[in-house]
Amino acid sequence: MKSLIIGENLFIRRTDELTEEEAAAWDALLLQDDLRRAFMSRHYIRTVAETGGDVVVLILYDGRVPCGFLPLQKAAGMRGAAGVYEPVGDVMADYFGIVASNGLTINIAQLLAATRGRVNAVFFSHLDETQARFGLSGTETRAGLRTWLGTPAGDYWINLRKSDKKLVYDTERREKKLINEVGPVTFEWSSQNPAHDMAWLIESKKTQYTRTGKAQAPLFDSQNVDLLNRLLRSQEKDCQGVLSILRCGEEIIAVHFGLRCHDMLHVWFPVYNPKYSSYSPGRILFKHLFLAAAAEGIQVFDRGEGDTQAKRDFANETHTFSRGLWHVPGWRGLFARGVLSASWRMNRWLG
């Protein structure tokens, strides 16, 4: 990577300052990636900014052509004052990294230094292993899981019956039991009553968080709830909200809200009615999601970060996320690291 100079081959813009050429280049680069991620789309980044996120985009140029987009969100409080940034959406982001042309390699310390004190450090998580091709890496690693439906996608459940007969049999047995004891099951890929069903999902998740001792979970923040509701209305191909419902009669059994990016569906906020937990409603919901996916044009379900049995039930690919801290050399980087450390100590003391 050549020397970076603001105003020549590096620009720092807010989402509403992007030129038409830059916006088109970002969309095209996202589409070229083998795994198109909604959380790295221009529309997701813009929506977070519209809900109050202090968002900027570092834009790299190769001559006159924009070739790389690294969106960042300024951290709150004293961390932000020290020039510390984080993934856009913070805890709401399931992916982080640069959207860039193949062949671009970044020296991240050089890039941050070129911002002239504006971005002194980036504390991040959810950096996918594929970002290594751009020279980006972290330290602490965690597993992520995906479900590829295969070709044709409509045969996924049939093929799963052969490879994991026990899982398929148990899921179908529980669904039959649910039908016999509660009533006929109906499934909606896209909710016919989205405002009501999203409100049910949010309240149910908050109840779940309270029950499991997660008092600081993201949906207790009204800004994050606003983000979900805005994304629910989004119909952009690279960031489309999909709210899917499993019902028995008028009663909700399970709900999932995810983000679609072309042929990928990010599994984001699943929740089930605990009244029906003995029927494994989450598994039944995913059975119907998989069966409907081919007709909807979905090829892969991304389960995000974390390796739990519930995620492993249907996963057939493991990949790696990393987290870490990038910072500029010299006193600015040391100061930013010191502010971060002080912030963590204060949070532990208060929490």
Image: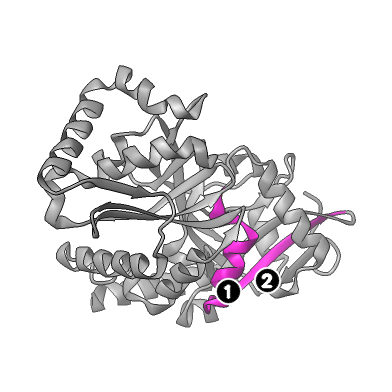
Please give the residue where the numbered disc 2 appears in the rendered image: 15
Q: Nearer the viewer, residue 170 or 1?
A: 170
Look at label 2 and name its amino acid.
Thr
Tell me which numbered mark, 1 or 2, is placed earlier along the sequence: 2
The secondary structure type at the circle numbered 1 is helix
Q: Residues within 10 Å of mark 1 (few under 14, many from 20)?
A: many
Q: Residue at x 39, y 65 (%)?
A: 193
The correct choice, above or below, for 301 with respect to 150 in the image is below
Is disc 2 placed on a helix, strand or loop? helix
Check whether the beta carbons of the residues at disc 1 and disc 2 lie within 8 A of each other. Answer: yes
Q: Which residues are magenta?
A: 37-62
Whole-percent x and y of residue 310?
A: 26, 41
- Magenta-drawn stretch contains 144: no
Q: Residue at x 77, y 57 (%)?
A: 24
The answer to whether any part of residue 289 appears in the image is yes
Residue carrying label 1: 49
Foreground residue among 334 and 8:
8
